[in-house]
Amino acid sequence: MKKQIFVHAIAFIFLIHQTIAQGRPPLSKDVAKVLYGTASFYSNKFEGRQTANGEIFSQQKMTAACNVLPLGTWVKVTNLKNGRSVVVRINDRLHYKMKRVVDLSKVAARQIGHKDGLARVKVEVIERKKTS
């Protein structure tokens, strides 16, 4: 019995080691694949500034900021008011006190019919960041 527990413990440790080595959190179910919340869009003052992943921000790229999902995750953002959606890549973070789900670039916000203020959205993960 003790030997069986020991073998399971070693297998568990190996599994954790492998997931960490591949850049994933150990044994996590990650975060939810669907999030509901409020979206906003970037202020023009962020144009040309560096994002959390090191890219230079552009209002013309299909990108978004999110505090919950890993950088590099591709998501489909759907405006719940009109049903229009857009696919963007998470490349930045919101301010840590921000309660919004995503902050979209202006070009992405326009595609879902979001022109000003805040919009209720559904955010669906469509692809996780691929590790090398």
Image (tube, rainbow, N blue to C red):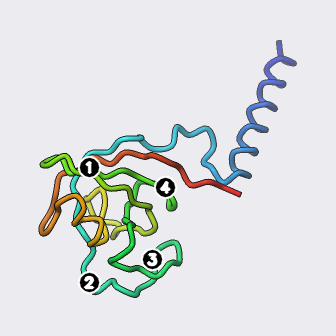
Which callout, 2 or 3, points at the residue further toward the start of the chain?
2
Amino acid type, label 4: Thr
- Of circles 1 and 3, the one toward us is 1
**89 left or right of 27?**
left
Residue labelled with disc 2: 44
Which quarter of the figure is the N terminus placed in?
Answer: top right
x 27%, y 74%: residue: 42
Give coordinates of residue 74: x percent, y percent: 46, 54
Q: How many marks?
A: 4
Distance CA(mark 1)–CA(mark 3):
23 Å
x 35%, y 76%: residue: 60
Against 24, residue 114 (above or below) is below
Amino acid type, label 1: Thr
SS at circle 4:
loop
Give coordinates of residue 88: x percent, y percent: 39, 60
Which callout, 1 or 2, points at the residue further toward the start of the chain?
2
Q: What label sits on residue 78 in the rendered view? A: 1
Which callout, 1 or 3, points at the residue further toward the start of the chain?
3
Distance CA(mark 1)–CA(mark 4):
16 Å
SS at circle 1:
strand
Which quarter of the figure is the C terminus placed in?
Answer: bottom right
Could you classify mark 1 by the number of other residues whose Cα lies within 10 Å: few (under 14), some (14-19), or many (20 or more)? many
x 12%, y 48%: residue: 81
Q: What label sits on residue 73 in the rendered view? A: 4
x 41%, y 54%: residue: 68
Give coordinates of residue 128: x percent, y percent: 53, 50
Between 84 and 103, the one nearer to me in the picture = 84
Residue labelled with disc 3: 51
SS at circle 2:
helix
